[in-house]
Amino acid sequence: MKFKTKMISTAVVAALGASGAAQAVHLSADGQGQVLLYPYYNVQTKGSTAYDTYITIVNSDTVNGKAVKVRFIEGKASRETLDFNLYLSPNDMWTGAITRTAAGDPMLRTTDNSCTAPEILTPAGASSTTSGVTREAAFVNFDYSGDAVKDNSLTRAKEGYVEVIQMGDLTPLGKTASGLNTYAAALHNAGGVPANCAAIRNGWLPVGTPSGFTSSIDGIAPPTGTLSGAGTIINPLEGTDITYDGIAVNNFSSVPLHFAPGSIRPNLGDINPKVSAILQGQSMVLTDWGLTPAPLSMPVSALLMRDQVINEFAVAAAPVGLSTDWVVTFPTKRDHVEQALLANKAPFTSTLGTNGACESVSLTTYNREEAQQTTGLIFSPPQPIAGNNLCWEANVVALNSSAVISNALGGVNTKLGLTLPFPEGWLRMGFAQTRVAPALATSFTDLYTGVVTTPATGTTYTGLPVVGFAAMTFVNTSSLANYGGSYTHRYSRRITP
């Protein structure tokens, strides 16, 4: 066993050396990383009930704090609805709830004390350093007002997903040019209140010309990961909740990415270096995407590209009320769709329009006893183009439901119905889209033999960059026996030299 472990380690080092990269971005096997992706949030109402979504971010680093960009993104075209800088001290945890204002518009509410820039104010619009005080920030439509989707409403921001990117480490010795120790300012006292959040925020003033924070001397060290988190979609009156873990991406950047509050950066295009590392079978596949014109987020897209999504379902009519929704989210889609050249859009194939940017999928369903059906499975409502397509960024597929609102998650904005011939079983969703990495940009390293192969011709990645989960709820209308749960999607990959 020691020999095998040593051989695998040697092979990984050899693979990185062959790529010329000191590190490569990869999916974390341990649930911690520099980037966290939360596939879905929802604050829609359903009859007399309503959904809230709770988000947690944990820094398990016992030595260093973390500077983090927190970004909320609507689900139709991946436009930002709210973002801010978050400064976590060692062992710190941030929590927030996505909910609704009195007018029914989406907003963030938190009682967390960790430093943010800009400051999240009290409902009265006041600053407060009191521990546990409620603070709120409304979602906005500035980023999508007037876009091709032609939907400027704040209702559009009631569904989407969350992106968390570590900008750097706060170290005990790090100081800004003006002498501010960001680590010390973010550190909590015995009462759970940070020492000086105002000093961190003031370092960015005046807006646009930060006085204390610069790209070279800002007291922020390169990011080292150790972030983790989870989401909970809860309907308190219905008595159901759906929980999931944030998807962790590690080795995202070897340099600090400390951008100003209000900046659209860092985003998933700020990977440094532009190298992806993917375990396929017993091979480590490394691709240097910096060797070809590609969307800046292509290394993350490569990590998430799957040619099949597989998960379970079970449905039953009232009074049992057993429902299943699938969340299918494409967190890098916007970066591809907005490329001017069709070749650069790959693996995506469409341009954003009123009905989204549609991508074809294949569907095969199975019951629990091997029976299957491929033909005749059609999404509803009928789509503007032939076949089955997922057109949005964060899609909710309601199985055996034609209702306007999905039963398990309450999805509306990007909801599709799918009628299946079986009340329970599993579903296979396939993607045949491709992107070709150029010749000599990819290496395949056998982790047991150490043999490295670098194809002289292009390597084909098949599929779409996808994350998500299946949500199941049991709402018994004849009793109070209501439950909810989630199943992380299972996937297959196809990377062929």
Image (tube, rainbow, N blue to C red):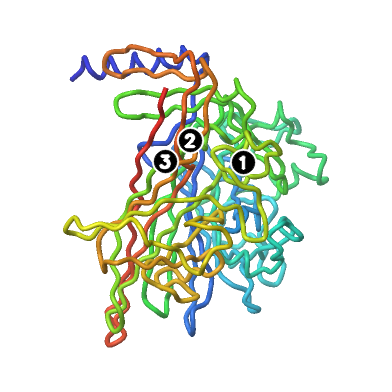
Q: Identify the residue position indicated by label 3 in the image.
A: 306
Looking at the rendered structure, the secondary structure element under dot 1 is helix
Q: Nearer the viewer, residue 181 or 472?
A: 472
Q: Nearer the viewer, residue 392 or 253?
A: 392
Q: Residue at x 39, y 19 (%)?
A: 444
Q: Amino acid at mark 2?
A: Gly
Q: Identify the residue position indicated by label 2 in the image.
A: 225
Residue 84 in view, yes or no? yes
**Disc nearer the start of the sequence (1/2):** 2
Q: Amino acid at mark 3?
A: Arg
Q: Position of residue 220 (x, y in %)?
A: 63, 32
Alpha carbon of mark 1 to alpha carbon of mark 2: how far?
Answer: 26 Å
Dot 2: few (<14), some (14–19), or many (≥20) neighbours within 10 Å?
A: many
Tell me: 16 left or right of 321. Answer: right
Looking at the rendered structure, the secondary structure element under dot 2 is loop
Q: Is residue 208 shown above or below 142?
A: above
